[in-house]
Image (cartoon, rainbow, N blue to C red):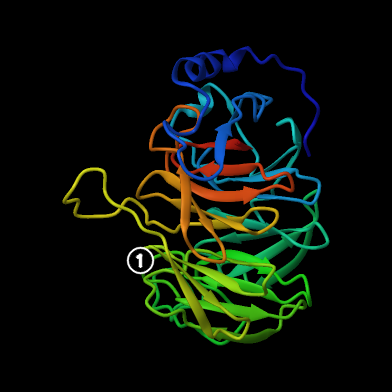
Amino acid sequence: MFANHMFKAGVCAVIVATAGLFGAYSSEAQTRGPGYQVDINWPKPLPGKWVLGGLGGLCVDRDDHVFILNRQDVLPGELNAGTQAPNIIQFDTEGNVINSWGDPKLLDDRLHSCHVDADNNIWIASAPSGMIQKYSQDGKLLQTVGVKGKLDSSDGTDKGRPLNSPAAIFHMPSSIFVDRANGDIYVSDGEGDGSNKRVAVMDKSGKFLRQWMPEGMATVHCLTMGNDGMVYVCNRQNARIQVYDKMGALKRTIQVPWTPATPNQKQEFGGASVAIDFSPDQKLMYVINQNSGTVEVLERDSGKVVTSFGRAGSYPGQFNQHHGIAVDSKGNIYLAENRGRRAQKFRPVQ
């Protein structure tokens, strides 16, 4: 468990100075809709010479505390200068580390996303993995659905042929959402090419209920549920969000348009709809667009893009493979970067 540390903020001087040179705003122009400004003072410096690996994702609890998922894939030799940061790190609203945990015997290595349920418990998905898990705020394992190390494939590994079995076992679970109405657990199972391609639904005990195969998806990279009761599923490679009812009937499709900055590119840079979350009033939907290096801001009802923020890069307000997104009760937006190995906070501004 995390112990209190006293430390100085001087290690952030270079970042702060750089932000002063290049500006704290997350994009060069905000001509439409709301604006978003990066908070260069969040988070505070990490204690204990911690070194982060790539961040798979993050989530926000009912107290607006942020949990980040550290994959611990540090570079060779990096730990000569520091120590391995824990898998799960919890920050308060000011960016202070207030807790950390993670048992490698329980967690899978490649942490992908997390979700906070109505009881303030933390659900974690890893890909590839044969399971999803529920933890208490202090890291006590409360529930496992599936079996660690046993994947839904012809040989039980990530090398085997994915089976899309109608059962509570997984191949590459990418996102989790627990229905506030009845506790049913929705899982997108299909993070990578050559994986399952389904949304699986279990009851709160983990018993399998049903599944559906989203149309036209190479991967099923994320899902969430709106307060309209619809399930929003990322079609990562085809630049759209597909919206289903709880039984798996497709109700609408929301396009996430983008244009390469340099014409005639032969491949995408991660996809245009990688992860999504909503504003507190759910009028807006935020979509990670790795192809453009931005966050797209859409009206949820109409699907119209109203603005975007960010750009590719490593300065504050820019993104180096942003991969996870979460919004707190005040409308602050948090982004987790895999290659950038950091989390950033953006405040809404008028």
Q: Quadrant of the C terminus?
A: top right
Quadrant for residue 93, please give it: top right
Q: Residue at x 81, y 46 (%)?
A: 63
Residue 210 in sight: yes
Query: For the view shown, which residue lies furthest in the left direction?
Result: 264
Total label count?
Answer: 1
Q: Residue drawn at (52%, 64%), measured in percent from left and top? A: 222
Q: Where is residue 37 shown, x and y percent of the image?
A: 57, 32
Front position in the image: 234 or 185: 234
Residue 5 or residue 43, whichever sits in front: 43
Q: Residue at x 63, y 81 (%)?
A: 246
Circle 1: residue type: Asn
Q: Quadrant of the N terminus?
A: top right
Q: Is residue 249 above or below residue 186?
A: below
- Left or right position of 274 against 231: left
Q: Position of residue 179 (x, y in %)?
A: 72, 72
User: How would you rate the neighbour count of disc 1 (Cα within 10 Å): few for under 14, some for 14-19, many for 20 or more?
Assistant: some
Dot 1 falls on a residue whose secondary structure is loop
Rendered location of residue 173, percent (x, y)? 54, 67
**149 lies left or right of 291:** right
Image height check: is 261 above or below 105? Answer: above
Q: Look at the picture and state if 235 lies above or below 85.
A: below
Indicate left or right for 308 with 279 as reference.
left
Tell me the residue that label 1 is attached to: 238
Q: Residue at x 63, y 80 (%)?
A: 201
When the figure is inspected, residue 296 is found, relative to residue 251, above or below; the finding is above
Instruction: Report the front residue among 298 and 226.
Output: 298
Q: Position of residue 158 (x, y in %)?
A: 44, 68
* Farthest right residue in view: 119
Is residue 58 at all visible to an observer of this figure? no
